[in-house]
């Protein structure tokens, strides 16, 4: 694949006490050179990848020449979470997916940056799982990130999130059509009843007995099944429940004392997956400290997926950061 680069990591230690002898880390860069410009790291979500802009870029509305994250000014780096399958080599899929945590992925991303001789980031930004990894990266190196921007996520998985990860894992391990069926369930977590009503309003397909919502769900199930591998889905789903699993209040106290990062929380008011209430609690708790933390909220009926839909609102929140 054009512009897809590989870093070979060796003897990678995991939180569970195991060691990976060899781990390929794939990435892409966009915009300016790594050596001569501020670096923005973009972390992808569950079914995403490093193609953040250009053909099939999933954040084209925000990243590019003259856009909010301006590639005429910044170097943008995007790693693929190991095992996500974007490199196309089935040998690089991860079988023992429960061995990994988001903290492991954060550490692996830092090792990749070390290899690239990137010692400091202007910002790390990501939505959902990618935002959870951004939190973990900031905890690991509290002095090395100027702006941490976690979107539609939180620093720690909730009971609700852990419960839904369990349901997804059960589907992925027991269904005869696992990716397809897991995606049907997941799409109902990413959207809201109001969003689906606006889009379909109980309409049926023309000359058919199938409801449009059913057709839409089946389409998304088939689409993901055709481009995503089962082992990759199992890993990405599992990682969600591990966000913040090793972070305790003592970790926060140490982090607040050390960090030079500005934290920019961006929640979605209708998000069922990572609720706005949880993010407001995080903000309220830590605005009392010396932590440089700000809170923004996307107003949308579309739920969790609003971070991939409400680009105008996102741009308003992000522009003051990236226009500095």
Image: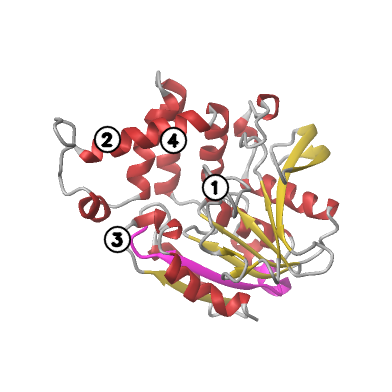
Numbered badge on residue 301: 3
Q: Is residue 303 visible?
A: yes
What is the spatial separation of the Cα atoms under label 2 and label 4, in whole angstroms? 26 Å
Describe residue 280's horizontal placement relative to residue 20 as left or right.
Answer: left
Q: Nearer the viewer, mark 1 or mark 4?
A: 1
Q: Is residue 74 above or below residue 236?
A: below
Is there a contact, CB below 8 Å, between mark 3 and mark 1? no
Instruction: Calculate the distance from the C-alpha at mark 1 to the C-alpha at mark 4.
Output: 31 Å
As rendered, which of 225 and 2 lies closer to the eye?
Answer: 2
Residue 129 image point, x, y percent: 54, 50
Crowd rating for badge 3 (residues with CA inside 10 Å; few <14, some 14–19, many 20+): some
Q: Nearer the viewer, mark 2 or mark 3?
A: 2
Nearer the observer, 239 or 114: 114
Cβ atoms at labels 2 and 3 below 8 Å apart: no
Q: Secondary structure at mark 2?
A: helix
Where is 49 relative to 232, above or below? below
Q: Earlier in the sequence, mark 2 or mark 3?
A: 2
Question: Who's the residue at 52% across and 34% down the image?
Answer: 233
Q: Quadrant of the N terminus?
A: top right
Q: Nearer the viewer, mark 1 or mark 2?
A: 1
What's the CA distance linking mark 4 and mark 3? 26 Å
N-term mark: 1 or 2: 1
Q: Which residue is mark 1?
A: 56
């Amino acid at each position: 694949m054009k512009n897809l680069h590989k870093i070979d990591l060796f003897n990678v230690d995991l939180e569970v006490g195991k060691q990976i002898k060899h781990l390929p880390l794939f990435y892409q860069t966009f915009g300016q050179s790594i050596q001569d410009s501020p670096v923005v790291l973009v972390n992808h979500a569950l079914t995403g990848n490093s193609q953040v802009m250009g053909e099939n870029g999933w954040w084209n509305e925000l990243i590019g020449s003259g856009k909010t994250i301006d590639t005429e000014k910044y170097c943008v780096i995007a790693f693929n979470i190991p095992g996500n399958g974007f490199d196309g080599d089935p040998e690089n899929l991860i079988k023992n997916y429960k061995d990994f945590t988001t903290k492991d992925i954060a550490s692996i991303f830092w090792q990749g940056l070390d290899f690239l001789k990137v010692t400091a980031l202007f910002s790390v930004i990501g939505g959902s799982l990618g935002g959870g990894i951004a939190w973990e990266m900031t905890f690991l190196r509290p002095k090395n990130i100027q702006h941490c921007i976690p979107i539609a996520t939180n620093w720690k998985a909730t009971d609700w999130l852990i419960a839904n990860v369990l349901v997804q894992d059960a589907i992925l391990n027991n269904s005869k059509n696992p990716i397809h069926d897991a995606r049907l369930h997941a799409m109902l977590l990413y959207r809201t009843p109001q969003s689906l009503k606006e889009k379909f309003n109980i309409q049926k397909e023309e000359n058919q007995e199938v409801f449009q919502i059913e057709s839409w769900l089946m389409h998304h199930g088939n689409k993901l099944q055709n481009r995503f591998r089962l082992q990759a889905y199992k890993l990405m789903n599992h990682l969600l429940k591990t966000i913040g699993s090793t972070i305790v209040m003592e970790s926060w106290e140490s982090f607040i004392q050390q960090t030079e990062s500005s934290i920019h929380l961006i929640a979605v008011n209708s998000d069922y997956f990572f609720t706005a209430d949880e993010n407001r609690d995080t903000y309220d708790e830590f605005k009392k400290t010396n932590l440089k933390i700000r809170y923004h909220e996307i107003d949308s009926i579309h739920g969790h997926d609003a971070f991939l839909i409400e680009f105008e609102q996102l741009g308003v929140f992000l522009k003051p950061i990236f226009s500095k």
